Image (cartoon, helix red, strand yellow):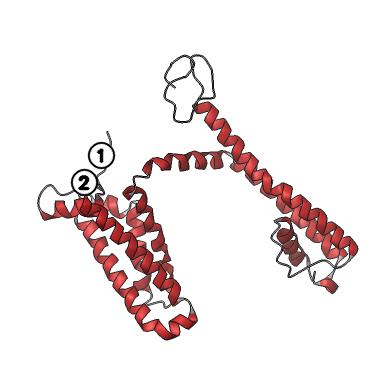
């Protein structure tokens, strides 16, 4: 059995109790610590967002800056406490959460040397992933892995599809440059390709629009084509997900399928799945 050295506490004394509070979520104090931590993360991100608004920054800039330093010092102390209460410091520091915890406090200190980098502290929002541990949602990660596996298995088909979409946009943009021309805003082929991408994706910013009847006709075809293209990646990923579900839930004895995803035994012959 693999031992998680990151979460092994010091054997005795105050450091062990502190480790249980910081890393544990089964005790009242551990849950309270995590809830307070997440609330502080949300508030610190909100402070940075408000500081990016010029009107608010002009009136409350000093208060927001002081609050940001309070949160940074708070998270710095928390980070040091995590290091002090684990047995394998290196493994924690290089772990996913260890890196996120460090990046959460780094931008504010960097802002002393490079002004503006303090806005990068919005990366703190990633620390809210700890809510999975608090709310016992770790089992749902298997569902995320199921979707990730389907996306990975679909990567070649999706890349071929994207390549086809790029070719369509280049072809349509080139045609529109010839049909409409600089007179109607299609100044060059790259701008025309940009228009084709916007139109094909059904976004439609409206900054460039065809004026000639032929250009409008081509535009309508591209719009209709866009609705069909949107459904293709969904179908590809859905197929892979269905295929994976069937593989996982086919009985090796009787060969029957159509079992529930969480089924442990075959409902036809009783064999373990």
**Identity of the residue furthest to the right in this view:** 213
Percent of width and height locating residue 51: 43, 77
Q: Is residue 61 left or right of residue 158?
A: left
Residue at the location (42% across, 24% down)? Answer: 264
Percent of width and height locating residue 86: 21, 52
Residue at the location (74% across, 63% down)? Answer: 195
Residue marked by disc 2: 8
Residue marked by disc 1: 3
Residue at the location (89% across, 61% down)? Answer: 214
Q: Can residue 60 be seen in this view?
A: yes
Percent of width and height locating residue 244: 54, 32
Q: Can residue 164 be seen in this view?
A: no
Residue at the location (38% across, 64% down)? Answer: 42
Question: Is the residue 123 above or below the residue 158 in the image?
Answer: below
Cβ atoms at labels 1 and 2 below 8 Å apart: yes
Q: Is residue 157 left or right of residue 144?
A: right
**Identity of the residue furthest to the left in this view:** 13
Which quadrant, please, contains the N terminus? top left
Foreground residue, 140 or 191?
140
């Amino acid at each position: 059995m693999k031992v998680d050295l990151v979460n092994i506490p010091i054997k005795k004394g105050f450091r062990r109790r502190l480790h249980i509070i910081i890393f544990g979520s089964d005790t009242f104090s551990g849950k309270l610590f995590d809830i307070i931590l997440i609330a502080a993360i949300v508030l610190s991100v909100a402070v940075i967002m408000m500081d990016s608004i010029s009107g608010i920054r002009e009136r409350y800039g000093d208060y927001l800056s002081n609050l940001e330093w309070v949160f940074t010092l708070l998270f710095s102390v928390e980070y040091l406490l995590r290091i002090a209460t684990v047995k394998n410091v290196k493994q924690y520091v290089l772990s996913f959460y260890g890196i996120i915890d460090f990046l959460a406090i780094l931008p504010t200190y960097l802002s002393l040397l490079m002004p503006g980098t303090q806005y990068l502290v919005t990366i703190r929002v990633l620390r809210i992933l700890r809510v999975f541990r608090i709310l016992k949602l770790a089992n749902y990660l298997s569902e995320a892995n199921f979707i990730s596996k389907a996306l990975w298995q679909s990567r070649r088909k999706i890349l071929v599809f994207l390549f086809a979409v790029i070719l369509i946009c280049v072809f349509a943009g080139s045609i529109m440059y010839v049909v409409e021309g600089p007179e109607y805003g299609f100044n060059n082929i790259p701008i025309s390709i940009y228009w084709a991408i916007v139109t094909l994706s059904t976004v439609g910013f409206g900054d460039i629009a065809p004026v000639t009847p032929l250009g409008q006709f081509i535009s309508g075809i591209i719009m209709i084509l866009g609705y069909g293209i949107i459904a293709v990646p969904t179908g590809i990923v859905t197929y892979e997900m269905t295929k994976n579900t069937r593989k996982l839930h086919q009985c090796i004895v009787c060969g029957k399928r159509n079992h529930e995803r969480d089924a442990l035994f075959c409902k036809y012959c009783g064999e373990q799945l």
